[in-house]
């Protein structure tokens, strides 16, 4: 008790004030921390969005090339117009123009030979993707037989380099180069 | 500190924690995507670099050729190459066989940086010259192949773990 009485009168107030200072600082410190975290979240989020969009684009371009390849190889006399329509629907630019040009002849030979072609996709590989255009390697096999015929079906192997372009939100094949 | 300001501090602390968790999740996702991209780039370059060597040989140097090719492989494929060297050498010498492979294209089918596994699609032209039994003139054959290399990362190197020619079953009629 004697020692308490010996202290100067302002000492207790000073100690209380010092003890309250960290609590008073907690608010501003947390507010600053939240501001920094929001900035970091925005920065990481933007990078993540871009990286995810690029990954999605890679997958979509490969899927589009693979789908187009199967359509190219699956043209039969029973539904030749629909089959050709599917090829045209998954292509654009040069690829579409070239196919449209040869479609009439393909339709004629397919109908005349009562041909049934079935395609199978073996693999797709992405070579590059830049500015909404992807280069994709495609491997597919084709089985051709005559409807009602007794000959053994013919099997053909295909290798292509395809250029796939983003048109709006869709990826369409814009160039098809068979690799001999 | 009043009750209201204590509540405000508590809320701010909760918000800071939640933001930290969100950043951690986004950063983990971003790292995975970047690792996939880097794995794809590295494995593609490695596959391109070794593919021709792995499928080429000369009857005069066939043991060294297969030994070098085996150095690019791992797992069961390494054993397969050792076996090939034993079984093919005699026939290759007899036929004076020379096989030259050239890569004409390479692309990535899928890539996972986390598991260190990348599938690479390759277009290859393979030229083979051999003199068959009873013939004097050598025969030359050129085949246009498609191959899948499964690359795995081992000790910071990308090695070929599997090799397939992509000749599957014909499509159903």
Image (cartoon, coloured by chain):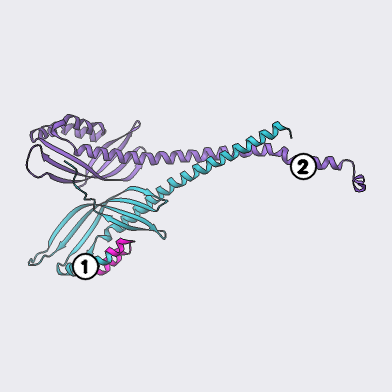
Chain colours: A purple, B cyan
Q: Mark 2 lies on which chain?
A: A
Q: In this view, does A151 lie above or below B162?
A: above
Residue B68's x, y, as percent? 30, 65
Q: Give the range drawn in magenta.
A: B59-80
- Residue A130 in view here: no
Horizontal relation, residue A81 to residue A49: left or right: left
Residue B169's x, y, as percent? 20, 48
> Secondary structure beneath disc 1?
helix
Q: Mark 1 lies on which chain?
A: B
Residue A19, disc: 2
- Front residue of A128 and A80: A80
Residue A76's x, y, as percent? 15, 35
Residue A39's x, y, as percent? 56, 38
The local crowd at label 2, few if under 14, some if 14 to 19, many if 20 or more residues have their Cα within 10 Å, is few
> Looking at the rendering, which quadrant does residue A19 occupy?
top right
- Front residue of A14 and A96: A14
Residue at the image point whose x is 84% and y is 39% from the top: A13
Q: Name the residue under label 1.
A: B87
User: Is the magenta region chiefly helix, strand or loop?
Assistant: helix
Q: Is residue B78 magenta?
A: yes
Q: Is residue B57 above or below residue A176?
A: below
Horizontal relation, residue A52 to residue A35: left or right: left
Gap in angstroms between the C-alphas marked 2 and 1? 85 Å
């Amino acid at each position: 008790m004697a020692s308490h009485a010996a202290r100067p009168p302002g000492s207790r107030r000073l100690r209380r004030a010092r003890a309250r200072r960290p609590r008073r600082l907690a608010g501003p410190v947390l507010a600053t921390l939240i501001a920094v975290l929001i900035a970091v979240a925005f920065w990481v989020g933007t990078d993540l969005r871009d990286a995810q969009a690029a990954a999605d684009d890679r997958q979509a371009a490969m899927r589009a090339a693979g789908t187009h390849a199967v359509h190219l190889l699956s043209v039969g006399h029973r539904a030749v117009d629909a089959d050709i329509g599917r090829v045209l629907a998954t292509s654009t630019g040069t690829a579409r123009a070239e196919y449209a040009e040869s479609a009439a002849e393909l339709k004629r030979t397919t109908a005349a030979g009562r041909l049934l072609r079935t395609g199978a996709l073996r693999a797709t590989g992405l070579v590059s993707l830049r500015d909404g255009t992807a280069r994709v390697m495609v491997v597919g096999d084709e089985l051709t037989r005559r409807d009602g015929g007794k000959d053994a079906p013919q099997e053909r192997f295909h290798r292509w380099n395809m250029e796939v372009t983003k048109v709006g939100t869709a990826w369409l094949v814009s160039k098809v180069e068979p690799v001999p | 500190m009043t009750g209201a300001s204590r509540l405000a501090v508590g809320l701010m602390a909760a918000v800071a924690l939640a933001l930290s968790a969100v950043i951690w999740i986004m950063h983990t996702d971003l790292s995975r995507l970047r690792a996939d991209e880097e794995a794809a780039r590295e494995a593609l370059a490695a596959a391109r670099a070794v593919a021709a060597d792995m499928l080429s040989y000369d009857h005069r140097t066939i043991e060294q050729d297969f030994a070098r090719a085996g150095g690019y492989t791992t797992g069961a494929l390494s054993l397969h190459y050792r076996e090939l060297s034993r079984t093919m050498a005699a026939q290759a010498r007899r036929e004076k066989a020379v096989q030259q492979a050239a890569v004409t294209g390479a692309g990535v089918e899928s890539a996972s940086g986390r598991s260190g596994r990348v599938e690479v699609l390759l277009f290859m032209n393979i030229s083979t010259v051999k003199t068959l039994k009873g013939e004097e003139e050598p025969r030359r054959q050129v085949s246009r192949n498609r191959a899948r290399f499964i690359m795995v990362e081992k000790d910071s190197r990308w090695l070929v773990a599997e090799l397939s020619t992509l000749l599957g079953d014909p499509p159903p009629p």
